Image (spheres, rainbow, N blue to C red):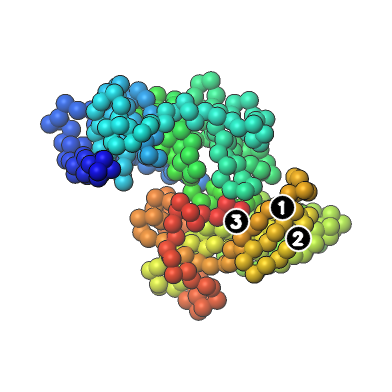
């Protein structure tokens, strides 16, 4: 009964959200502008939500952002709308037990790869082998690192206070008192490769985990790099040390269209234990649905890795913009319609919270 009452209360609150926000001048309640100003970057985009009063505190209620103007005046970001919430206990007012305050996210777990960075304030494990680190300077400049990485190149996200790092999102209060939310694009998480060629040949290869992969087409190359400038030229002896494994595929999470078909698909490559855990990982058992691996860090333990086939997933118009940013249409690789038959197309649409490939 209590849960039913909470749901009815929330429905009543949300019904009035759009009118209370759009007519801010008619209300004494503090408000946040519903339509954000968006700044689009290569690996993420930032939404700036302008408030008519400076925000003081930031937290999460049931996984959704709660921005507070004071100890009793709040706005809950729920399904792309801001619901006004009053009271000293906003979580209870919304029918939930607790609110997670921004300070509770400032944690670096023991033995986290983020520990080596003195300015790291938050760490999130996003897959079996990947960790996301949020750093902040004394002045409140935020940056992100994805570990492990071949190069230590933090990406600047923004500046302000009370940052909250979740799986693919960073939220904070800007020094202008407004709410900022940075959404990381799937290409941010895809594995890095090195493009190389021998001095004696124009043919370009990719190097991943000390293994060489041939690049079958320019379309494949441009899902990994924006130009040929990053290609390294190596002497023949060094180049020959890398064994050729297979053909490289499109970068994970690449957007694909076929001919004039309006459907947009997200490419998901088959997984590979050598790419996930290194070329020397020992495969103990190879079953149709999974591998049993020897843990590289502790040979007495095993790792179960479920097999993921190569496939395409349809993505909706709303999800493609929210996930890949406002310039998503510029990221599409267009293929001839005759190639569509080569791919397995999932009957389930791409779900950003579960289907982004991190390896």
Left or right of 353? Residue 289 is right
Q: Which residue is mark 2?
A: 284
Residue under the point 55% across and 76% down? 342
Q: Position of residue 296 (x, y in %)?
A: 75, 49
Q: Position of residue 250 (x, y in %)?
A: 58, 62
Left or right of 154? Residue 86 is left
Q: Which residue is mark 3?
A: 224
Q: Which residue is mark 1?
A: 302
Q: Nearer the viewer, residue 20 or 294?
A: 294
Residue 207 lies, with reference to residue 168, above or below; the image says below
Residue under the point 48% across and 54% down? 354
Residue 140 lies, with reference to residue 245, above or below; the image says above
Q: Position of residue 192 (x, y in %)?
A: 64, 51
When asked about the image quadrant of residue 243, the answer is bottom right
Which label sits in the foreground, 1 or 3? 1
Label 1 SS: strand
Please report contact status of discs 1 and 2: CB closer than 8 Å, yes or no. yes
Examine the rendering and report whether any part of residue 182 can be seen.
yes
Q: CA distance from mark 2 to mark 3?
A: 32 Å
């Amino acid at each position: 009964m209590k849960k039913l009452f909470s749901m009815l209360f929330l429905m009543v609150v949300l019904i009035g959200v759009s009118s209370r926000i759009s007519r801010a001048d008619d209300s004494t309640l503090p408000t946040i502008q519903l339509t954000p100003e968006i700044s689009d970057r290569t690996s993420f985009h930032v939404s700036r939500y302008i408030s008519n009063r400076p925000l003081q505190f930031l937290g999460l209620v049931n996984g959704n952002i709660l921005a507070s103007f004071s100890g009793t005046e709040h706005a809950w970001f729920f399904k792309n709308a801001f619901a006004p919430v009053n009271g000293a206990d906003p979580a209870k007012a919304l029918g939930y037990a607790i609110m997670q305050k921004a300070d509770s996210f400032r944690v670096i777990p023991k033995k986290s790869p983020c520990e080596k960075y003195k300015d790291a304030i938050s760490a999130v494990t996003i897959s079996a082998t990947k960790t996301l680190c949020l750093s902040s300077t004394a002045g409140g400049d935020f940056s992100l690192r994805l570990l492990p990485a071949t190069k230590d190149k933090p990406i600047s996200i923004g500046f302000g206070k009370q940052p909250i790092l979740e799986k693919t999102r960073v939220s904070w209060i800007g020094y202008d008192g407004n709410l900022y939310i940075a959404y990381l694009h799937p290409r941010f998480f895809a594995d890095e490769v090195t493009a190389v060629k021998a001095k004696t040949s124009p043919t370009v290869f990719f190097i991943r985990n000390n293994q060489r992969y041939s690049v079958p087409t320019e379309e494949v190359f441009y899902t990994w790099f924006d130009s040929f400038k990053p290609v390294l030229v190596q002497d023949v002896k060094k180049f020959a040390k890398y064994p050729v494994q297979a053909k490289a595929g499109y970068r994970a999470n690449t957007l694909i269209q076929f001919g004039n078909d309006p459907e947009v698909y997200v490419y998901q490559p088959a997984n590979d234990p050598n790419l996930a855990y290194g070329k020397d990982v020992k495969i103990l058992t190879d079953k149709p649905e999974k591998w049993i691996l020897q843990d590289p860090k502790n040979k007495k333990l095993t790792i179960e890795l479920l097999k993921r086939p190569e496939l395409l997933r349809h993505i909706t118009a709303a999800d493609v913009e929210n996930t890949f940013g406002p310039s998503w249409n510029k990221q599409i690789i267009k293929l001839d319609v005759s190639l569509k038959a080569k791919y397995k197309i999932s009957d389930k649409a791409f779900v950003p919270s579960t289907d982004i490939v991190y390896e």
